[in-house]
Image (cartoon, grey):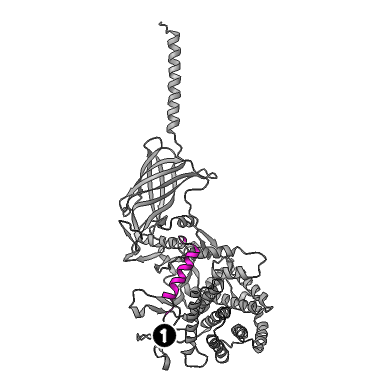
Amino acid sequence: MTYQNPTVRWGMVLLACLTLASYQVVQAQSATPLEGIYQLSGEDPRFGPYTGQVEIRINEQTGTYRLIHTQIWESVCFEGDRIELSCSEEGDKIALAWEGEVLTVTEPYTFRVTLSPVGFIRSYRGLSREGVNPTPIEFLATFRRMGRDTLKGVFVPLDRPEYAAFSEEWVWSSPRADRPIWQNQRVEIPSHDPIPADTKASMFDLFDSFYEREEVSPYLDRSDFQEGMHYVVFDATDYEFYRANSDVVRVIQKIVDPISLAEARIRSRAYGKSLADKALHFDTVTPLYHLNEAGIYSHYDSLAPADQRFVASSDGTLWTGVYAASQALRYLATQSPEAFENMRRALEGLILCFDIAPAPGDFARGVRARVADGDPAYVQGIGAYADWDWRPGANNDMLKGYLVGFTWGWLALEQAGGDPALQARMVEIVGNLLRDNEIAADGLSNEMLLRMLLWMMTDDSEQRWRYQILFEVVKPFLVDNGNGSLYEFGISDWSGNHLNLQGLLSGFAITRALGDRREGDFRKGLRKGLEQLRHNRLGLYQLVAGTLGDFQQLPPELEEALWVMREFPAPKVSHDVDWSINPAFSLSPLPALPWKLDWGEQGGSVRFVLTLFSNAT
């Protein structure tokens, strides 16, 4: 037996302890936690290198991890509504944000993300979703540590070779913060209670011929179709991001391509501008591009020949009146001379719509400069109006253009000191409508509101007492039922809701201007209408009724109305929108306007009532 020197033996033990401690320190140094925020750099074969952030975040309730991922490409832009390989001052940077799953939390780490290849635009600038498999694509990734703080791996599409893999390197930078680096905030809110089983069965029996239509049949066996629930969408995703980064277009949870970028740009144009910026934009472009030579609100086609770019609206008289009212309100609030001039142009357009129709009490749905295109919807004016075409078919909807335009226009003219010639023509037209137009002289709310207007214009006591008599007739409908604004299981007269609001608003404005005691009744009607349309984000209705209705305290719909305005893009855009390409979409089981029995024209209302873009999609 050999004996070891005790000093040597204890030295070896000490060395072993130090070695173990050193190893544990090294292990501790290399054990950077998986959870946290990483700076990423990556590259894909389509658009090249990109940078961004990744966050691995634990759900404290479930103990599961999720992967949050944002990136921005370094040298490509969405410029002129197309992708360019270089960026100019006008180009928008392109970016992507998504959320995925953490499948394993030990090395090798595995992750999964699902991206959609389609959204809601079917075609765009020669590109099309036709033939594209709409099924979401799964990308799987395996990452390994390349050092204490660095992970590296590749995301590979699963069974979808038409999509490219992308490689990334992540460098750990900090623990997670209270808020995730990005969050998808889209929510779908039920717009009504569940339909009782017996009511649903009766409705499905009533609309059986609707379900026989070819475009409806693909949805018949879907559970969401059979459920019959309708939803409104609220989506504040990236609002704060765009307020700080208006020069970026960020795609959400989708494959990045020109179509998905066109979809994302709508959100960018909505959230990247303040409400004041949007007001300035529309105040600038509307009188230039949407009031035609006659002063009638129109569409605009910039690609048409110069003398045919104004495309007349079939509802031009209504929208001209609404525009006149908007500019009158703008003038009343700001004293803007531009607003006053815009209002005058629109009021003169409304007068032309009345003057061009030869029959007593008749008026045009709209007027355009003479175009010999053979469109049977228009007829050439006669005599002094031969240089104009006008559209016959005056109805209740168009009449509201005179009511709302003349009501607010009169108030603005009075504040500006008056315009005797213009105001005399307005008085004459309202009087003629009441005398010769049976829609105006209906013995109900139309006649009542027009007689209120004529009383305000002329201070004629006869008009006042006639209005008061008619008010008692229509009060149960106008006041107690919110002027007929109803919503039942996803069905409503959406155009009618706007007309109902304009009637209540005009009545309120007149009674308030004249100090009439029935102002309170119109305020009650506004409140009742909004209560009956709750859970529907109608924007204007919520803003007007929520502000002027006789609520004890401001209703939550006012904040929703502000969001609707935030969600509105500026400039407006027109795309080939078709939600049926998206597998998440389901048709409504109920026709949009069932009382019209016009399945061929109306089809069905969508399951998701999309207000952003509408709504920020």
Q: Measuring 38% from the left and 35% from the top, which residue is drawn there?
A: 147
346 lies left or right of 434: left
Q: Which residues are magenta?
A: 271-293
Percent position of residue 375, x then y: 38, 85
**95 in relation to 143, above or below:** below
Amino acid at pointer 1 = Ala
Q: Give the camera-side residue of 422 and 96.
A: 422
Q: Horizontal and vertical percent for residue 463?
A: 64, 87
Q: Can the viewer see residue 382 in this picture?
A: no
Q: Which residue is mark 1?
A: 377
Q: Quick one: 586 or 356, which is closer to the camera? A: 356
Q: Is residue 283 magenta?
A: yes
* Image position of 511 (left or right of 201): right
The answer to whether 325 is drawn above or below residue 56 in the figure is below
- Lateral position of residue 200 relative to residue 184, left or right: right
Secondary structure beneath dot 1 equals loop
Q: Visible in this render: residue 585?
A: yes
Residue placed most toward the observer, 187 or 445:
445
In the depicted view, which residue is nearer to us: 356 or 460?
A: 460
